[in-house]
Structure formats: structure tokens, C-alpha cells
Image (tube, rainbow, N blue to C red):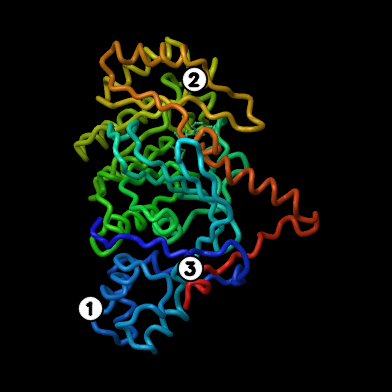
């Protein structure tokens, strides 16, 4: 990324409480593309270069309030301020893990919660051991996919995230950690391809030179296997990387834990993945959670090896993170190793990702679930349906 180093300006950090506006959220500026902002400012009678000036303040200088945009006229700043929010995610909770993974629970303007996880260096995904940072972002509140092992979908889908709510996760993570995020993985809560349009707009903003400026090949989108959207993404210009949550190497096993497999069984998923690889000239990643006595047999390993070879894909093995209330558990380390050995013997590039974030419930949706359960317990019964009021961090940011 080309922007200036971040300052850890604690006065600019969003507060975790207070504020109002939960029922009439303003549009968020970070959800607009340069084209959209240019068109809007033209309607306001502003010259063409104005939009780029605003984007510079937002993404290069990282201001958190319109008042700081000192080369804009006062009336324009006021008009922007009336029309747009600039930062809306408030930190509701933060957790740090022993391996220095940091997890943020953000409260959205409407009081809902999402999670983002900062993972310092991610050799499993990128084969590097460096001081690079990967941010795991959410794309929906909840999830409709109903994967049986996953905390995110336990309460179903609440809503899609807006493009800005996706982009802002990166801006806030960078502000809060004082570090640049080198890689993004869309592996947080939600199914990114079920929120296709908003995710694509966010990707455009994250990738753009006037925006966050992260290279498309440093962005990995993970999907449970929505075949039509995989094909659609294959036809888009943006060469983002694709990871697929396989978790079962035969229909019988996959179907048991991922209902989406009934709609898009392996016979339709695999050709769509081949199309993606061909269109993007990319190697895809097959993610495979190891769940004891569910999908960890050596027979599944052989089937997985065959699929991976067919796709020339690499395989990421992830020992299952236990989720409270769910019956699944992770296999022993020796069993994990035996599973990996079958793949390796077949020449499949395989990584076994142990532990990162296990102690902070970093698995998809776990922290949010805890928070929501705590909220329900704390709130009096009559008010239980009402979301907590969102804070407006931007107002705290103004001098
Ligand atoms: N919906 C997308 C992205 C979000 S899930 C997808 O399915 O790929 C990100 C990854 O975390 C997926 O591979 C998911 O299967 C995995 N995951 C979910 N719950 C988990 C758990 N308890 N332990 C380990 N991995 C988990």
C-alpha cells in the first residue's frame, strides 16, 4: 500500500458506547467508489478533481472526520458531514491471543455485531514467515449457509454488510493496531458470495489506487461453494484469490455438514472451480477442517488428494475449533498428521494450520455469538429484541 505510516492516535479511536442514530444511519462515505463520489460532487457543482481530494483524506491521510479535510471549503465540509458518516464501527470488545492474533468485535450503526481478526504472518496461506499482517474480515451479520460445525450460522442470517462496513474493518484494524494489513482474507462471518454486489464494491475500493490499495492477489475470498457466483467472479476483472471450504471430499460426507452441497454437489462445484483457475490463471486453496470421526478418515484424505490433484489446488488443513453447544471436536494430532501425510504422499501441497486464534474463539462467528448471548442475558426480557444503540465514533474523533 502506498499510504503514509499510521499513527496510533488513540483520540481518533472509536468509543465503544454512547451516541445515537441507530435508526437513521447516514450513508457511509467509504462505501463509495471514486466514480460515484465524482458524480455526486458534480451534482453539487464541485470540480472533477474534488472527489480525488476527498479520497486522499480518507485513504492516504486517514482522517476520521470531515472537519480535518483542510483543503475543502467549510460549506463543502459541512455538506459532506451532513450527508455522510465517515467511521461507524465501534470497538465493542477486543481479545488478544497468546500467538498475538487480535480479534475485534465491532458494533455497527444499527447495533449489530461483526468480527475482524488480525493474524500476524500467515505462513499457512502465503508460505511466508515474516512480520506481515493478515486481516480476516466479515461480509454478513450471521450467515444463511447453516454449516453444522460453524458458530456464525447458528442464529441464521441477520443482514448483508454494506460495502463501507467491509472497507471500514480494514481502516479500523489499521488504526487500532498501528499496522498495515498486507493481506485480506474474506473468511470472517458470512458467505461473501451470498453478498456478491456489496463484496465486489468493497473489493473495488480496497484494491483501487485511490482507495486502500491492496493488490488483488493479496486478497483471498473464501466460499462455501456457491457455484453461480464462483462462475460470475471468474468473469470479473479483479484477480482475487479463491479459497473453497470443502470439509468433505465426497458428497455423502460434505452433505452431512454443509447443506449447500445438496444444491451444488461436487459434480457442479469442481467444474466451476476449474473455470475459476483457468480464467484467473490461479491456484486455488481447498480448506478442510478436520473434525473427529466426521471427515478425518484416511479414505476421505485419498478422495481429497484426488480432487486437489484434479484442480491442481493446495490444501489447507484446519483442526476444528470447538464451538460451545456443538458436538464436534478436533482429532488428535497424530490423526491430523496421518491425514496430512496421505495428501503429501500424493504430491499435494498441504499445510496443517494449528492453533492460531484457538484461544480467542477466532473461529468464524464465535465471539459475536458470545456477545449476543451475553446481551440477551443482560437485557430485560421485554427489550430483548431491540439492538443496543450504536455509538457514533466519528463524533468522538472531532477535535
Ligand atoms: N462462508 C465462507 C467464509 C467464512 S468461514 C466459507 O465458508 O468459506 C471461514 C472458514 O472458517 C471456513 O472454511 C469455515 O468452514 C471455517 N470454520 C468455521 N467454523 C470453524 C470452526 N469451528 N473451526 C475451524 N474452522 C471453522
- The disc placed on residue 11 is 3
Check contact, mark 3 vs mark 2: CB within 8 A. Answer: no
Marker disc for residue 81: none
Which sits earlier in the primary sequence, circle 1 or circle 2?
A: 1
Residue at disc 2, secondary structure: helix
Ligand 1 within 8 Å, label 1 CB: no
Q: Is residue 193 visible?
A: no
**Residue at horizontal 64%, vertical 48%?**
371
Q: Say which residue label 2 marks.
A: 253
Residue mark closest to the camera, 3 vs 1: 3
Q: State the residue at coordinates (53%, 61%).
A: 90
Task: Name which of mark 3 and mark 2 comes first in the sequence.
Answer: 3
Closer to us: 230 or 392:
392
- Vertical side of 87 occupied by 206: above or below: above
**Residue 53 in the image, given as x and y percentages of width and height:** 27, 75
Under tag 1, what secondary structure? loop
Q: Quadrant of the N terminus?
A: bottom left
Residue ID at (21%, 40%): 280
Amino acid at each position: 500500500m502506498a499510504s503514509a505510516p499510521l499513527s496510533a492516535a488513540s483520540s481518533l479511536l472509536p468509543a465503544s458506547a454512547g451516541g445515537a442514530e441507530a435508526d437513521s444511519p447516514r450513508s457511509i462515505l467509504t462505501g463509495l467508489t471514486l466514480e460515484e463520489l465524482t458524480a455526486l460532487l458534480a451534482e453539487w457543482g464541485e470540480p472533477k478533481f474534488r472527489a480525488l481530494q476527498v479520497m486522499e483524506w480518507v485513504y492516504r491521510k486517514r482522517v476520521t472526520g470531515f472537519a480535518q479535510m483542510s483543503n475543502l471549503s467549510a460549506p463543502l465540509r459541512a455538506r459532506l458531514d451532513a450527508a455522510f458518516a465517515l467511521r461507524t464501527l465501534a470497538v465493542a470488545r477486543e481479545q488478544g491471543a497468546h500467538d498475538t492474533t487480535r480479534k475485534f468485535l465491532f458494533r455497527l450503526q444499527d447495533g449489530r455485531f461483526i468480527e475482524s481478526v488480525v493474524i500476524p504472518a500467515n505462513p499457512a496461506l502465503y508460505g511466508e514467515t515474516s512480520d506481515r499482517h493478515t486481516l480476516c474480515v466479515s461480509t454478513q451479520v450471521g450467515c444463511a449457509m447453516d454449516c453444522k460445525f460453524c458458530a456464525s450460522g447458528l442464529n441464521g442470517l441477520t443482514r448483508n454488510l454494506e460495502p463501507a462496513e467491509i472497507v471500514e474493518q480494514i481502516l479500523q484494524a489499521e488504526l487500532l493496531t498501528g499496522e498495515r494489513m498486507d493481506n485480506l482474507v474474506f473468511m470472517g462471518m458470512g458467505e461473501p458470495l451470498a453478498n456478491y454486489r456489496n463484496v465486489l464494491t468493497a473489493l473495488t475500493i480496497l484494491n483501487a489506487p485511490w482507495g486502500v490499495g491492496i493488490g488483488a492477489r493479496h486478497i483471498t475470498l473464501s466460499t462455501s461453494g456457491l457455484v453461480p457466483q464462483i462462475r460470475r467472479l471468474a468473469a470479473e476483472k479483479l484477480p482475487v484469490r479463491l479459497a473453497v471450504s470443502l470439509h468433505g471430499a465426497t458428497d455423502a460426507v460434505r452433505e452431512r455438514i454443509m447443506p449447500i452441497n445438496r444444491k451444488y454437489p461436487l459434480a457442479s462445484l469442481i467444474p466451476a472451480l476449474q473455470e475459476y483457475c483457468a480464467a484467473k490463471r490461479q491456484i486455488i486453496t481447498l480448506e478442510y477442517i478436520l473434525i473427529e470421526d466426521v471427515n478425518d478418515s484416511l479414505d476421505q484424505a485419498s478422495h481429497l488428494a484426488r480432487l486437489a490433484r484434479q484442480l491442481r489446488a493446495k490444501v489447507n488443513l484446519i483442526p476444528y475449533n470447538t464451538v460451545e453447544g456443538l458436538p464436534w471436536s478436533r482429532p488428535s494430532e497424530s490423526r491430523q498428521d496421518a491425514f496430512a501425510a496421505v495428501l503429501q504422499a500424493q504430491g499435494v501441497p498441504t499445510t496443517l494450520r494449528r492453533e492460531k486464534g484457538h484461544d480467542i474463539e477466532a473461529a468464524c462467528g464465535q465471539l459475536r455469538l458470545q456477545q449476543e448471548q451475553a446481551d440477551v442475558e443482560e437485557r430485560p426480557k421485554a427489550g430483548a429484541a431491540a439492538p443496543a444503540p450504536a455509538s457514533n465514533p466519528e463524533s468522538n474523533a472531532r477535535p
